[in-house]
Amino acid sequence: MLKHSGALLLIFISLSVFGQQKIDNVRTENHVYIKGTKIYLIPPKGFTVGQNFLGLQQNESGSSIMLLDIPGPYSETSAGLNAENLLGSGVEVSNIEQLTFNGLSAMLITGKQHAYGNSYTKYILVFGDESETIMINGVSSESMKKIGAKIKESMLSAVYDAGMKLDPFAALDYTIDVSETKLKFAGSMSNSLIFTVDGKIPTASKDKTNLIVTKSFNTVTPEDKKLFCINRIKKTPVDIQNIEYVNEITVDGINGYEIYAKAKSKNAEETENIYQVILFSDNLYYILVSTTNDETVQSVEEAKKAIHTFNRK
């Protein structure tokens, strides 16, 4: 589940490659630090701090610039960016440009996607080294060409401070305690936390137990919250064999549903046990999901113990 390509479902690849461009930026007084990241940007006029993600947004136009720090080498991440992997996401790709961005290998991807009856222009700037990959994802309505151009300009103004030391928990509005379990903090991505047995991504342990905690970016008000949770677990990149139970649950005063399911890995016959909790709060939701290859209930019980320590700040 913790493969870098799995984290790239919302981005896209081009069908054509152009000549390589070199961009070297210097931080200026117009650059703004994006809290929780290693990035400074010159924001487009009218954009403010993202409410539920790391980045910038403009409410009136529905436009945004979202930043992701992927704990994996650029060589692996960029290799996963191919048309075959992303055709199913409904993205129409127009081009990809190979760049040298502030001395690092990079890709600038342009595309279009249809969602909720609207068409959106998307820009993705991807760069990094062998320790981490940075993704800057710009989105605007296809009809708002000027805003789209300003978003692209802002993204290309990025200054990356590779040596900056981040507190991965500081920018989050929640806490979770895994100290009484076998899980260890492995990394963070935007407003998500990832825990594995050995604290590595991907894990090198034979015990593949992991826990991912994240908060939704967009508002959601499902009429049938139970069905929403069931449909969400079915999107897990494994073959669900059987849903063992679906129960109402309350954690930190937030109501939601817990689901336990048996599954098989799509790449092997290995058993996967999945425990998912979704908590609904303020038209958003928190999702806490653990997968394990442990066929006993012990690992799931440890994940439950951690999940019940979840608290909003």
Image: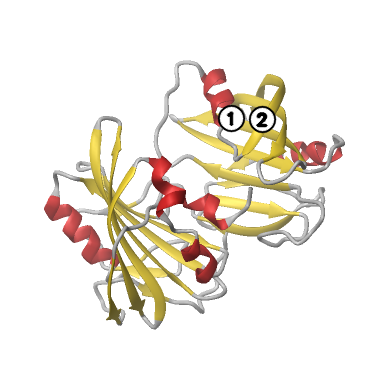
Residue under label 1, please give it: 234
Q: Residue at x 66, y 60 (%)?
A: 201
Residue under label 2, please give it: 240
Mark number displayed over residue 187: none
Q: Secondary structure at mark 1?
A: loop
Looking at this rendering, what residue extends furthest in the top direction? 224
Examine the rendering and report whether any part of residue 169 can be seen: no
Residue 149 drawn at (x, y percent): 17, 59
Q: Secondary structure at mark 2?
A: strand
Residue 134 drawn at (x, y percent): 45, 66
Q: Is residue 191 left or right of residue 3?
A: left
Please state which amino acid type lies under the numbered disc 2: Ile
Q: Residue at x 38, y 46 (%)?
A: 51
Is the residue 92 above or below the residue 184 in the image?
A: above
Is the residue 206 above or below the residue 157 in the image?
A: above
Q: Is residue 127 left or right of residue 201?
A: left
Residue 94 drawn at (x, y percent): 25, 55
Please state which amino acid type lies under the numbered disc 1: Lys
Is the residue 226 above or below the residue 44 in the image?
A: above
Residue 145 drawn at (x, y percent): 13, 51
Distance from the alpha carbon under mark 1 to that under mark 2 = 7 Å
Q: Nearer the viewer, residue 20 or 146?
A: 20
Q: Residue at x 60, y 54 (%)?
A: 3
**Mark 1 vs 2: CB contact within 8 A:** yes
